[in-house]
Amino acid sequence: MSAIPLSADLFPKPNLSLVLYGKNDLRLETWPLPDKLEPDEVLLKSHSTGICGTDLHLWHNAQAADLKLTRPFCLGHEPSAIVMKCGSNVKHLQPGDNVAIEPPIPCLTCDICRSGRYNLCPISNEQSHGLPSSDGSLRRYYTHRADFCFKLPSSISLEEGTMVETLAVCVHAFRRLEFKPGENVLICGAGPIGVLCLMVAKAFGCDQVCITDIKQSRLEMAKQMGADHCYLIDAEAKKTEPQIAQEISKLMGGKAPDVGLECSGFDSSQTLAVHAVKYGGRICLLGLGSPVSRVPLSTVIMKEIVLIGAFRIKDDYPMAIRLMETGRINVKPLITQVYPIEQSMEAFKLLGTPGVENVFKVLIQYDQ
């Protein structure tokens, strides 16, 4: 079946979009409207999009990891939206449905996809909406593959729906760890990923969770969300990672954590996880940092620590949505600011302010 042409009268408003042109060059402008709908796609009206550290990195550097800006493109990869129209092959969605969107689009034909690990598909890097140079969700109207759109139950608002992507990343990390109920958990970094990992650990039946950060306000949020122990990393104290690891063990009743999740990407945080987890422990690395790391691999070897990478999401949206739907995880307190699309630059400036406090997850929202 062929694509369906989309007429301009479908769109009552201009396609106002947040477009990155280069380093520190972010512009709010009208973007071209979608002009066709493929049989396996849905046409979406954007509702809300969460802003994360990757967006800030793109704004300042026009690059994220190996993905460099090659043309002006629209940001946004933590979206919720409303279905406007369905392609001819789409059966599980209908106009008016609220959806959370999984941004990367794998090829589904390569050996990696066929093995079931579609999150590692090389093509998906080029087709990950919201990363260079595939336009993201900070557009009023756009199309997306329907099988990567997940209907939200009525109990989950569209604002909460923006958190499904981040929560699914955390669910994937725990699946990669083969986490077992009753294990003790160390989480390095109390940003949105770290705090959601804390909430997943609780939902999955952990014993104790200790979470670390350099900001007291983030640790206060983590405590509110159920952390058993919070450890403030004080740079002026000049403690070594082994010393901090010993103090974390004391906080946890003399037990070294069974597993660690590193969510910041910083060398010092990765090193702390290595020294802190038990002999034979497991560490999942989520934070993308420098391409070169000073992680003490000799300690990894001597402790027989298993280092595990976790990249994006693999069939984790349904569980993330179910955790929210059943009330096991409540993301509402994490959303601290909501800006209309017309004030999106103010949202980015707020998040980019060094040392800003009481700001956790910021959303940009379209009028509805």
Image (cartoon, rainbow, N blue to C red):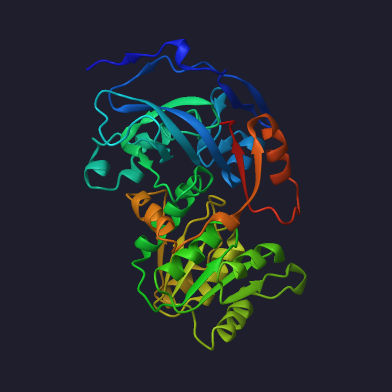
Would residue 70 be found to the left or right of residue 304 on screen?
right
**Residue shown at the point (46%, 54%) measured from the top left:** 167
Q: Nearer the viewer, residue 264 or 357?
A: 357
Is residue 265 visible from the viewing direction of this image? no
- The quarter holding residue 23 reads top right
Q: Nearer the viewer, residue 294 or 254?
A: 254
Give how far across and how far down residue 200 sits, in percent.
45, 64
**Residue shown at the point (66%, 62%) measured from the top left:** 218
**Residue shown at the point (59%, 31%) measured from the top left:** 367
Quarter of the image with the C terminus is top right
Q: Nearer the viewer, residue 264 or 50?
A: 50
Would residue 176 be found to the left or right of residue 286 on screen?
left
Q: Quick check: 349 above or below 321?
A: above
Quarter of the image with the N terminus is top left
Q: Quick check: 246 above or below 259?
A: below
**Residue shown at the point (41%, 72%) measured from the top left:** 305
Give how far across and how far down residue 30 sits, in percent.
60, 18
